[in-house]
Structure formats: structure tokens, C-alpha cells
Image: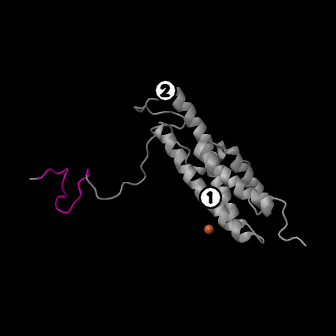
Amino acid sequence: MAARTETHTNGRRNSRVSPDPKMDAKAPQIQPFGTLRSLPIGLPDKARASSCEALNEILADSMVLYALYKKHHWLVAGPTFYQLHLLFDKHAEEQNEIIDILAERVQSLGGIAVGDPRHAAELTTIPRAPDGAEEVSVMIDRTLRGSNDVLMSDVLRRHELQVWFLAEHVVDVPLLTS
Ligand SMILES: [Fe+2]
């Protein structure tokens, strides 16, 4: 006869085995933010800690910048709507890729990556934009400054390109000359 802990008996469930999803799981966090796990990698703890801290600052800024590009993608208006609508979305997608690279780098170093956007909002250096719509020139200026502030290796090249594509929209060149 099978053990009562492994089988259902006479249509009744035993108390230890259940096909029901376990809901409302509660437990303390297993690694607090700002701490390192011990991993078998060659870097000293001090270097890992300072790298994680720096990467998390850039990650927080990148998350805010991603959201800002999306906001501008939605709210942009005027004669350059279509090209800026597409450009802001393209930059948002690029930020999204950067975010993933940064977060996974932090994890691979044994740290905890910033994940919640409310946490990113606490750490970012990018000033908060008003919740409403702004003029196109202000939108561009805002993302231009944000992109220019977030600088580092692969991130740097992507940001330089984003700065270029944005800056071209605020050069003082008339559409037509008479
Ligand atoms: Fe869209």
C-alpha cells in the first residue's frame, strides 16, 4: 500500500501533497539591495561593490530615460510629429536593451540590480519632467540632456548616437530659404 503522504486516499487529499497553487507566499528577502553574494569570480569584493553601485546609478538613469522617451513618443505634437514619434520610440527600445545589459552585469557581479521603477526614481539624477505635455523643443532638450548624462562604453556609443539624432532637430536651419 502506498504511503498516505504520496497519494490521494479515497478521493480525499492528504495534507502534504496538493495540486493547488500555493498563494500568498511570504518570506524575508534573501539578499538585500546593496549587498553582494559570494560568487567564484576573480574580482575582489571592493571592486565588485563599487562596480555594482556605479552600474546601478546608470541603470536607474537609463530606466528613467526609457520612460521619458516613451512619454515623448506618445505626447509629441506638431509638424515633425511623425519622425520624432518614430525616433523617440527607437531610442526607447535602445534604452531598453541597455537596461537589460546593465542589470544583468550587476547580477553577474553578485549585486542586486535596480528593478522597480520607483526605486529607479529614488536613485536617478535626471530631473523629473512635468506630468503634462511640453513643447517639442523642451522634450528634445530634456532627452538630450538625459542621454548626454548617461555615459559609459557601449552605453556611451549608443548615447552619442541618440544625442546626434536629437540635436539635429534643434539646429537653427530653416526648412526653406526664400
Ligand atoms: Fe507606440
Q: Quadrant of residue 177?
A: bottom right
The residue shown at (60%, 51%) is 117
Query: Is 23 rendered above or below residue 38?
Result: below
Mark number displayed over residue 92: 1
Quarter containing ligand 1? bottom right
Q: Is residue 109 left or right of residue 155?
A: left
Mark number displayed over residue 44: 2
Asked whether mark 2 lies closer than 8 Å to ligand 1, one says no
Report the amino acid beneath label 2: Pro
Please tell me whether the stretch drawn in magenta is mainly helix, strand or loop: loop
Mark number displayed over residue 166: none
Q: How is the image coloured?
A: one colour
The residue shown at (43%, 46%) is 26
Can I make out residue 74 in this image? no
The answer for how far apart the CA atoms under marks 1 and 2 are is 34 Å
Report the amino acid beneath label 1: Ala
State yes or no: residue 152 in magenta: no
Q: Which residues are magenta?
A: 2-16
Front-most of residues 112 and 148: 148
Horizontal and vertical percent position of residue 43 = 47, 29
Residue at the far left in the pictured view: 1
